[in-house]
Image (cartoon, coloured by chain):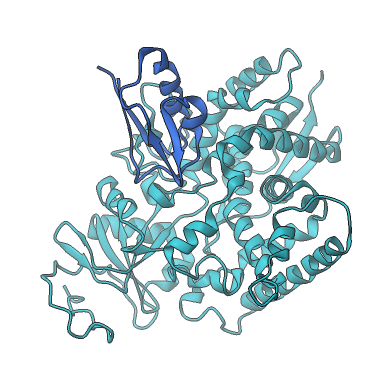
Amino acid sequence: MSQATPAIATDDAPAAPRRSRGNAPPVLSRNLPLLGHLLELRKHPIELFTRVRSECGEIGEMNFAGNRVVLLTGERAQEAFFRADEEQLDQAAAYPFMTPVFGRGVLFDGNPEQRRQAMKNQSLRDKMMRGHAETIANETRRMMEKLGDAGEVDLLDFFAELTLYTSSACLIGPEFREELSPEYYRVFYELEKGTDPIAYVNPYLPLPTFRRRDRARARLVELLTEVFERRAARTDGKRELFDVLLSIRDESGKPRYTIDQVTGMFISMMFAGHHTTSGTAAWTLIEMLRNPGVLPPVREEIDALYADGREVSYQALREIPRLEAAIKETLRLHPPLIILMRKVMRDFDYLDFTVPAGKLVAVSPAVSNRMPECFPEPDRFDPARYDEGRAEDRQLFAWIPFGAGRHRCVGAAFAMMQLKAIFSDLLLRYDFELTQPPESYRNDHSKMVVQLRQPCRARYRRRSA
Amino acid sequence: MRVRVDLDLCQGHGVCANESPEVFELDGDVARVIEEQPAAERHEGVRLAAKYCPTGAITIEEE
């Protein structure tokens, strides 16, 4: 193996006793000087990750402009990745392209324990879900009022706007949600487009995409500054999450968090819960419309559920298996994040191999979710995979649209409930139809944040009562 | 019936403690099993807890 050079000993541990080391993982071919596999990552990331599996097997090394990323594939290797503790595999520094987006002092700073505390969001606890179901139903109705009887929408715009309102109303607060306008989701869109993998070279290069990213972030700070100045000046009204954070003082009486930092928290919450859900919503509708036989049984299920004019309820949303299966199958085929990364803090051993501290290790949901040994006919959209006897999503370390283990997306249950609430209302009241050739709906993979490529349009018409 | 929670998977959502408060409780960040071999009248609640657990962290061994 050409890459078998020992890792450079770190300065802070010169006298550490030498441990026996396993082999270095094989390095993927076509490793270009300087850039490594970066160009391939920007062009065809899923093909790149798939190539690691077919060429190197369960473990293989990629090179993103000098950042060595060891990709683990297969249920067993992925389980080792997901079960490793945070002191060994850390999320910090694994996502350099996110720092300019979130800002400094947000999310990926601090030690694992501090982050665990910061990430603990009461609003995602099961107890809160009942209220969220109602909030989401209300937001969906407000969007439907804007739709009118018939027309055409761009699915990315429509669901990005809707989920901006649902996510912010549930996770931050109803008053804050009222401050938001379509400008916000457009700003987020610019931020998301600013996650070009070229950031592995340097996230501050003077490129148009990074300039737009920084302008978008500055605009968001400006918008929120105005919101919070107005909110701070008023004497009535509720104190919501961000009002509370902004009112905290440190020992010297200075504000603990600046508006810039709160903006960063807002961005990080939206990155976790917004484009992911909105993209999944759009894909769910597309897949239901372009795969014959999927929509009618889902429709039947929804119609039966609300036949007596009942309101959407949390319990009803838990027992809606056909719609749930359609969403799960969409998530399997179009996971919003196609690669999950960790930094190795302590040498990571797998089989005969050792990944030394300092490198990155990764798992790819896009590869895993289509492994034929776990998902027969992996490219087929087949909601029956989730029927009782098969339950292919119970392969907890293979079906990983939300990741797995301790770092599994904490918003997964919220996201599923949200998608079910949105579609049970939308499909109850509207008929949809794709206006483009079915295969023209595709993702744009040129950025680390995957987005549906525009145009992605659909026609709708209100169902007769 | 014997109940276990895989702490590598649990994230403390609290579904189990809501479904079956006699058998599960939230202990800080994670779920804790109070009654590892629950009495028969609690089996239904335990099965619901396992079914709805968002991380699939609960395993039940039926005896």
Residue A342: quarter of image: bottom left
* Residue A25 visible in rendering: no
The colour with which the image depicts chain B is blue
Residue A158, placed above or below residue A104: above
Q: Is residue A144 left or right of residue B6?
A: right
Residue B54, position in %: x, y?
47, 36
The residue depicted at 53 percent of the width and 52 percent of the height is: A120
Nearer the observer, A59 or A228: A228
Nearer the observer, A7 or A373: A7
Quadrant assignment for the N terminus of chain A: bottom left
Residue A257, position in %: x, y?
66, 70
Residue A207, position in %: x, y?
61, 81
Judged from this view, the residue extending furthest toward the left is A20
Nearer the observer, A453 or A215: A215
Residue A28, position in %: x, y?
28, 67
The residue depicted at 36 percent of the width and 47 percent of the height is: A368
Q: Is residue A349 left or right of residue A33?
A: left
